[in-house]
Amino acid sequence: MTESSSWTATFASGPREPAMLPERTDAAIVGAGYTGLSAALALARRGVETTVLEAERVGSGASSRNGGMVLTGLKLGPDRLLRRYGERDARALFNASLNAIDVLEGLIAAERIECDYSRTGHLEVACKQSHFEGLVRTQRVLDQVFGHCVRVLSRRELREEIGSVIYAGALLDERSGALDPYRYVLGLAEAARRAGAAVVEELAVARIERRGDGWLLETARGQIRCKRILLATGAYAGQEFRPLRRRFVPLGSYVIATRQLPSELTRSLIPKGRMIFDTKRLLHYFRITPDSRVLFGGRAAFVPASEATTRRSAQVLHGDMVRTFPALHDVEVEYAWGGTLDVTFDLMPHAGEIDGCYYATGYAGHGVALATLLGTLTAEAMIEQCPVRPFERSLPSAPLGLYSGRPWFLPLVGAWERFADMVS
């Protein structure tokens, strides 16, 4: 088993000549993932001189470590959106998730990004009968309030969609899609470069300082001054901008991928190629990859990834995968890796500015499309000096202020979520 992402291991991007670090730029973006690169593309298209600074390589964070699922909706389900925000704002937020898919599809088409994108649809599978009854209620709300068409599948109907008998039913949304996340982020980087943006890799930002009406960024290769700045590091943010780091929690997520499988086996498991996730609080998500592997992920550990947590999580996920698909009992796992999600204290995405510095964060597992959208919208806000609607709400901080950016409480949260799954 190789402890690395199957997406990056099976696609070699090749060496690249180091980009020059300019002394000045109009807009500086820290982080070369979906958010930063879609923002860079939007800014460069508008004629804004833009420089992206990446501590490692393009897409080395969450943008190459996720499951490649392009999903409708948000971390909060439609019922909770309605209760918290009211019908008008809830509809605007949910519709933004649909618009995010349109924006992503438009970028892929316009920039001719080859990333195996397809509209596969997704299944939310019910782990218990009570969960299935909740999905029935969700279908009604989506139809009657949000005008979004999804279909409830009974346990019997679900047999046509998945080669597993452990689920009580499902909700099918045909709008969602799938892609190769690493090829997508590399395509965004090339598109941004073609538009005129500079993408400087393997150069961390050590310090950010306000200077007059602009900013000074210090790196190991010198300083760069800019008029506008966007922090697009997500959960991989360092201490260079502490006011933002204190407002989200870096949450671990782990993934395994099997060896390449015969097509007749993959068709028996997920015959229509859906993206699938379950109804647990510590959820599982799984799919068939374009190179015919089973990818199986979940919150096997809550803490950010390390070698030890990745190994332990691989064992846990393998057991969960075999319980889901007994046919995979003797199939070896070829890749295992971890990644880190940025989760805000209200479980919602946010974009805007803090102390004059722009940011976009909080995708909570829905970042492939949402990060593309929020990067684009935040770039427009930087130019037009306007809010990032509908995600401009104040970014909440921790209750009682008992959080400095180090998530000491994650083991307690994980224990609570496991208990909640048992009694739900």
Image: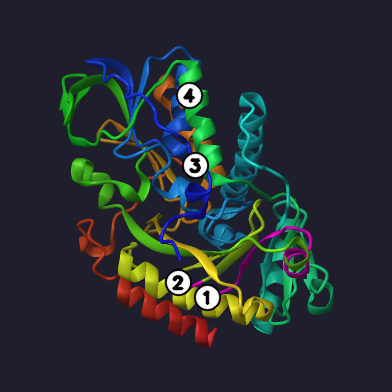
Cβ–Cβ under 8 Å for marks 4 and 2: no
- What residue did someone put label 2 on? 314
Q: Residues within 10 Å of mark 4 (few under 14, many from 20)?
A: many
Give the image location of residue 172, x and y in percent.
Answer: 75, 62
Do we see residue 302 in this rendering? no
- What residue did someone put label 1 on? 318
Residue 192's disc number: 4
Residue 371's disc number: 3
Q: CA distance from mark 1 to mark 4?
A: 38 Å
- Looking at marks 3 and 1 on the same chain, the residue that comes earlier in the sequence is marked by 1
Q: Can you say whether 268 is above or below 90 in the image?
A: below
Q: Residue at x 37, y 80 (%)?
A: 415
Residue type marked 3: Ala
Q: CA distance from mark 4 to mark 2?
A: 35 Å
Cβ–Cβ under 8 Å for marks 2 and 1: yes
Q: CA distance from mark 2 to mark 3?
A: 27 Å
Name the mark nearer the viewer: 2 or 3: 2
- Looking at marks 3 and 4 on the same chain, the residue that comes earlier in the sequence is marked by 4
The question of residue 11 being in magenta is answered with: no
- Looking at marks 2 and 3 on the same chain, the residue that comes earlier in the sequence is marked by 2
Q: CA distance from mark 2 to mark 1?
A: 6 Å
Name the mark nearer the viewer: 3 or 4: 4
Residue 301's disc number: none
Residue type marked 2: Ala
Give the image location of residue 354, x and y in percent.
Answer: 29, 38
Quarter holding residue 325:
bottom right
Give the image location of residue 286, x and y in percent.
Answer: 61, 64
Q: Which residues are magenta?
A: 266-282
Name the image quarter holding the C terminus. bottom right
